Image (cartoon, rainbow, N blue to C red):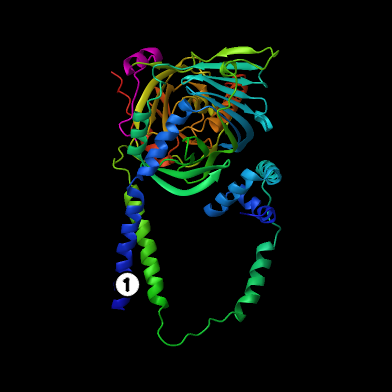
Amino acid sequence: MLKCEKVELILARYVVGALPPWSRIALARHLDQCPPCRRLLDLHHGIAMLVEVLPPQEPPVGLWNAVAHEIGHETPGHQPVPTAGFDWRPKVAVAAAGLALGVAVGQWWSAQPLMTPSGGGSSIATMAPATPRIATFVQQHGRLSFNDPLTDQVSLAAYVTTAFRDNERMEGNVGTP
Amino acid sequence: MKQLVAVGVIFLLIGGLIGISRISRDDPRATRLLQAAMQAPMNEDFTAQATTFANYGSRILHSEATFYNAKGGKYRIEYKLGSLAGVIAGRTKPGMNWRYDPRRRSLYTDPMDPVASQPNEADDLAMVLANCRASIKARAIVAGRPSTEVYLDPKGGGGSRTFWIDDVTGVILRSEEKNAENDLVSATVFHSITYNKTASPEQFLPMPPSQTPVKWVAESDFAQQMKDPATVSREIGMPLVEPTYLPSGYRREGYYVYDCPGCHSKAALTRYVDGINSLTLIQTSKACEQHMDKRPLDFGMGKAVSLQRGESNFWALGELPRRELERVVNSLQPPAKS
């Protein structure tokens, strides 16, 4: 069982989705039984939402050069440790690489769709974020998903409510650029 | 050197076998749990406290909610936080949804086709299992209940789902949806759940909070289901065009027509599903200002791409990789003008 002190340290990583699965499970278990930590989680979510709406910040001029300079100072002192006798490391490295490659190829091969596409390529180059202009599409697309099996009704209803609001706001502005 | 090559090849073969076997077999326990999860909303009364997130394009929607479920597939969701505070969403029975929005002081009723929306767990489960690899990931305690983490990975490459399913009742205690790029796009987790306790029967009906004057908005005419493509073509005044390419596992769920708020004429909507994800194809007149913006869009839960061909604009929306959506719209071939 996680302790509250440990939870405080890992909550920020949990909120941004950077926590490994086993830690997430342990944390979820703790949060189920600890109201103070759940309040702390709410605070983190609030901060994460604020960060989302902040404009992007440029790093100070010269920061990268300073970091590279520091790294350059440290590396000369770092020497590889010599080993004696039978050198097993190349074999292990090749085996690990082969295993990883094999798993990747196997998964990729199994994940290929059975149908082959028809039609040509596309010249579409950039993706735009959602705007009120597509709210109608999103609204229709989401609304018709309510009766699909295993749909998360709680998040979908939140989503569709927001799309409806955007669409109503847009209806007064149809035709403007 | 030969030794090295031999070791590499052996492990390559072992790794390949592991990679294939890991994801090509459905776990029968996962199948049983998914079946229970589909039946639970019809069979259980419960009240749960939940946290929910949804990625809406550039915005993150976040709220706390109380979720009341009643036997027969009824539910009531009361949102409590942020922009969604005060919103109530409900379902009187499968296919009959409603929503109260305090910002608009409006109550939206959404009666869909009651025949088409009757749940059929056997068909639904068969489609999910035909199109997804189902596997068990871990055991966990969620909302104080022993549960099992079940992962659904679509074979066609769309968004995946992870469910934490109550071992005893089959209720989904936690749910995560990822898009085709493996980014989390929505999640709901129950912090507590009380079985055999739910809202009073009248609270599942479309009613605003007491004493609140509201505008009633019927959405019954918003996307009406049509029986066949010929009817759709008559309604929209041009031939309905259907794709010759669909992503693996997708089948047509229905034809719809709605009033486009951009050009105030009828637009066609054809919907395809694979069990957990959906693909919506929209066809409008090319003169419609609503659909002038041709850039592909990312609306959080999915993506949209467009194409103008012949006299029509087409949009494809879905929880699919962009290249798959592009293949779908590129396969649309309107009939040549006679």
Lateral position of residue A71 relative to residue B320, left or right: right
Q: Is residue B147 visible?
A: yes
Lateral position of residue B32 relative to residue B92, left or right: left
Position in image of residue A108 (x %, y %):
35, 52
Q: Residue B191's quadrant in the figure?
A: top right
Position in image of residue A56 (x %, y %):
66, 47
- Asked whether A159 or B327 is in front, the reply is A159
**Relative to A129, does residue A88 appear above or below in the rendering?**
below
Residue highlighted by disc 1: B7
Residue found at x 50% / y 25%:
A143
Residue found at x 43% / y 40%:
B322
Crowding around mark 1 (Cα neighbors within 10 Å: few <14, some 14 to 19, many 20+) is some
- Asked whether B218 or B255 is in front, the reply is B218
- Asked whether B50 or A134 is in front, the reply is B50
**Relative to B213, does residue B242 appear above or below in the rendering?**
below
Magenta-colored span: B228-246
Q: Is residue A20 visible?
A: no
